[in-house]
Amino acid sequence: MVKRSKKSKSKRVPLKKKYKIEKKVKEYNKKKSKEAKKVQLSGKRKVEKDPGIPNDWPFKEQELKALEARRERAIQELEQKKADRKERKVTI
């Protein structure tokens, strides 16, 4: 059986090895960040624009008016909620 030294092994490393390790770590981190960017870019989906109502649609005017009315109602509801929140905040 081989006798082992009771002293701890020295932490000294040749500079060639040290720089080689640093280079590998840097390379690995660069590769990981590149992959993360790819995943992030591919994860986003482009929002398609609504083509709207075609001109040859028989009831285009009515549809546009109904759409505008819905938008107005939604805006009014948001304003109402905002006012309610302000009112509650003032009373508290």
Image (cartoon, rainbow, N blue to C red):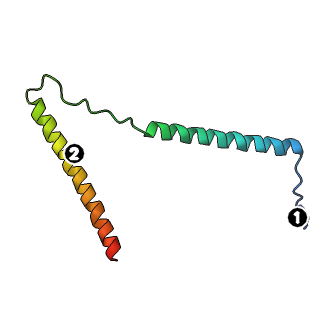
Q: Which residue is depicted at the point 31% across and 32% down? A: 49
Q: Earlier in the sequence, mark 2 or mark 1?
A: 1
Identify the element where label 2 is drawn.
Answer: helix
Q: Label 2 is placed on what type of residue?
A: Arg
Q: Horizontal placement of 73 versus 90: left or right? A: left
Q: Residue furthest left?
A: 58
Residue 35, percent across and down? Answer: 56, 39
Quarter-of-image position of residue 57: top left
Q: Is residue 60 above or below residue 79?
A: above
**How far apart are the alpha carbons under marks 2 and 1?**
75 Å
Q: Evaluate if marks 2 and 1 touch, with contact meaning CB atoms under 8 Å apart.
A: no
Give whichever of 48, 17 is nearer the camera.
Answer: 48
Residue 42, percent across and down? Answer: 46, 36
Give whichever of 32, 64 is nearer the camera.
Answer: 64
Residue 19, percent across and down? Answer: 82, 42
Give whichever of 63, 10 is nearer the camera.
Answer: 63
Identify the element where label 1 is drawn.
Answer: loop
Q: Horizontal placement of 80 versus 34: left or right? A: left
Q: Residue 8 got which mark?
A: 1
Q: Which residue is depicted at the point 87% across and 41% down? A: 16
Q: Horizontal placement of 13 versus 61: left or right? A: right
Q: Which residue is depicted at the point 31% across and 66% down? A: 85
Q: Residue 71 got which mark?
A: 2
The C terminus - image quarter: bottom left
